[in-house]
Image (cartoon, helix red, strand yellow):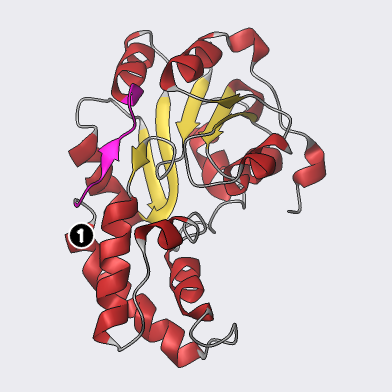
Amino acid sequence: MKTGFVFDLDGTLVDSIPGIARGLNLALKALGYPEHSVDAIREMVGKGARELCLASLKGYFNGNVPEEAFEAVHRGFMREYPHTWQEGTVPYPGIREMLLSLAGEGYPLGVLSNKPHAVTVPLVRHILPEIPFREVMGFSERFPRKPEPDSLLSIVRSWGREPAQVCMVGDSAHDGNTAVNAGTRLILVGWGYSSRSALDAFRVPVCAAAGELSARLHDESSLPFPVAAHRNC
């Protein structure tokens, strides 16, 4: 039975920062809060929309963000982002070809994101329409966000596999901890939104390009498990 691969979306398969930044800045501007540079927002992403909106206000409020201010920005972002995600969102070089190769060889493929499910599905269908993903899952009330393992384990079960027969592929400690908590294998990529030190802590390969990632994924016998020391990070 071939290994199943579950990919994070933002920072792993696609660079989505321009659209995220546009949506967030529109929400901030409408409420009279300072906007942020694309590079600053790049450092805030990865933990879901609510954490992104909270992070965007911490400087303005010196870290103690009033709940009503945070909720207002979150509502604004959720209103704007479905209309801005297309702006500048593209697959990373070589990703489309790698996914087509894996799919053609019969590997089950899925996407698991902390991005809202209502945005994740159309984004994947728009950016990677030719990839036959068996599962595309964003955040909803159905499961808690990564790094809780529930969503990943749901995909594992739907594929009729055990956790050891599935590999999570991501660009962040959240992805690494999701794999730890679910008991799956893990490969990380270094072109996303996390620091190298955060990735190296899991003691698994950190790929520098899609070609290297493809080679790692095709070598099923050497797909590693992340170190359990990071389970509660």
Number of dots carrying numbers: 1
Residue 53 image point, x, y percent: 43, 72
Residue, far right: 229
Callout 1 secondary element = helix
At x 56%, y 52%, the residue is: 146
Tell me: 213 left or right of 229. Answer: left
Residue 39 image point, x, y percent: 41, 57
Residue 174 image point, x, y percent: 60, 49
What residue did someone put label 1 on? 84
Give residue 222's quadrant in the image: top right
Kind of residue sitting beneath label 1: Thr
Residue 2 appears in view:
no
At x 45%, y 43%, the residue is: 112
Q: Nearer the viewer, residue 188 or 153?
A: 188
Is 151 magenta? The answer is no
The residue segment tinted magenta is 87-95
Q: Nearer the viewer, residue 41 or 69?
A: 41
- Say if 32 sits above or below 103 in the image: below
Tell me: 67 left or right of 198. Answer: left
- Say if 23 sits above or below 150 in the image: below
Residue 78 image point, x, y percent: 30, 70
Give residue 195's quadrant in the image: top right
At x 46%, y 70%, the residue is: 50
- Say if 202 sits above or below 172 in the image: above
Residue 7 appears in view:
yes
How crowded pointer 1 is (Cα within 10 Å; few <14, some 14-19, many 20+) is rated as some
Tell me: 50 left or right of 203. Answer: left
Please name the predominant secondary structure of the magenta segment in the image.
Answer: loop
